[in-house]
Image (cartoon, rainbow, N blue to C red):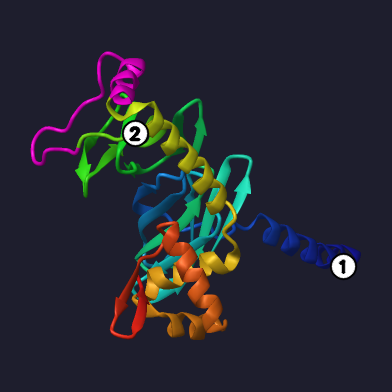
Amino acid sequence: MPRREERLSLTPTLLLLALLLAPHAAPGSILSSSVAVDLSPSGLATVTHSVNVHEEAEVVELALIAEPEEVVAYGEGGPIYARAFMNSSGWFAKVYYPPASFNLTYVTLKLASYGGGFWTVSFACPYVTEVKLPQGVVPTQIPREVLDMGYVDGRRSIKLPPGSHLIEYAVLVEPPHPGPGPSPQPSPLGAPFVLLIAAAAVGAAGLGAALVTLRRRRGELSSLDDLDRAVVELVKRRGPLSVAEVAEQLGIPRSTAHRKLRKLARYGLVSLKKVGAKLLAT
């Protein structure tokens, strides 16, 4: 009889051990993913991950390429709950109950840095990444491993394989690309010679003015608040929207919505167009 009581007393302990050792639900596996980076002249980057996952995935974990201001995930059915977090390996985002295909977008000022007359973009990404440089820049350093390079809407586009990459460029006036044909390659004479030719073409005064403008605009963009970002995301997802519609959907006065839209238009984050008596944001 004492032995029977001993066996019964061990049962809760065994159950507890079984629960502790039971495997936890792992993040859903990603079938495919690609990343698009859109760089503005001020150093602000808009990053979009296009992701395909197993339909039964409940949680998907994505590696981000820089510290995000805020992550927004959306699919065909609308917004999806997502949150960003950091661990010892870097920045990540968890997307909960995603559809089979979705996008995750964020803006960041941590991807590009300015110093000594150059902008430097440095990142590591486990996915194929397409980087679109600002218009009118002179690249001075491009990764050796490039999947594709050309021009899209007058801007240089560089497609890179998974890995760590560094791109360096100066914001100068570059002659327009003539159109279809082979994409121009980095000059074999090196960055100093490229900059010397570019500086001679635009003049020292033009270069100085461009750099002063970059510093000022970067300072302005770093002051964006949560409401500014909410307006950008709202217009991006549901635009075109009138001032009244922005005010109604965010629960703010029309005067505030109008002021925010004008500010964001100056930064190039939204576009404003007069249609009849309405001012529409896209």
Residue in view at x 54 percent, y 43 percent: 110
The amino acid marked with disc number 2 is: Leu
Question: Looking at the figure, which quarter contains the C terminus?
Answer: bottom left
Residue 167 visible in the snapshot: no
Label 1 sits on a secondary structure element that is: helix
Considering depth in this image, is 51 or 201 the residue closer to the camera? 201
Which quadrant of the figure has residue 83? bottom right
Residue at image location 36% in from the left, 37% down from the top: 162
Q: Residue furthest right?
A: 2
User: Splitting the image into 4 quarters, where does residue 74 fall?
Assistant: bottom left
Location of residue 167 with respect to 102 vertically, above or below: above
Look at 42% across and 52% down and name the residue there. 46
**Circles 2, 1 touching at the beta carbon (< 8 Å):** no
Q: Residues within 10 Å of mark 1 (few under 14, many from 20)?
A: few
Disc number at residue 280? none
The residues colored magenta run: 176-200
Which sits in the foreground, 236 or 42? 42
> Residue 209: percent from the left, percent from the top?
43, 37
Q: Magenta stretch: residue 154 in it?
A: no
> Residue 246, percent across and down?
46, 80
Vertical order, 44 against 1 (above or below): above
User: Is residue 238 among what the camera can see?
Assistant: yes
Q: Position of residue 141 (x, y in %)?
A: 36, 25
Is label 2 in a helix, a strand or a loop? loop
Q: Dot 2 corresponds to which residue?
A: 172
Judged from this view, the residue extending furthest toward the left is 181
Could you tell me what secondary structure mostly forms the magenta stretch?
A: loop
For mark 1, what is the residue? 5
Q: Furthest-front residue in view?
A: 205
* Other residues around mark 2 within 10 Å, as few (<14) / some (14–19) / many (≥20): many
Residues under labels 2 and 1: Cα distance?
A: 84 Å
- Considering depth in this image, is 51 or 134 the residue closer to the camera? 134
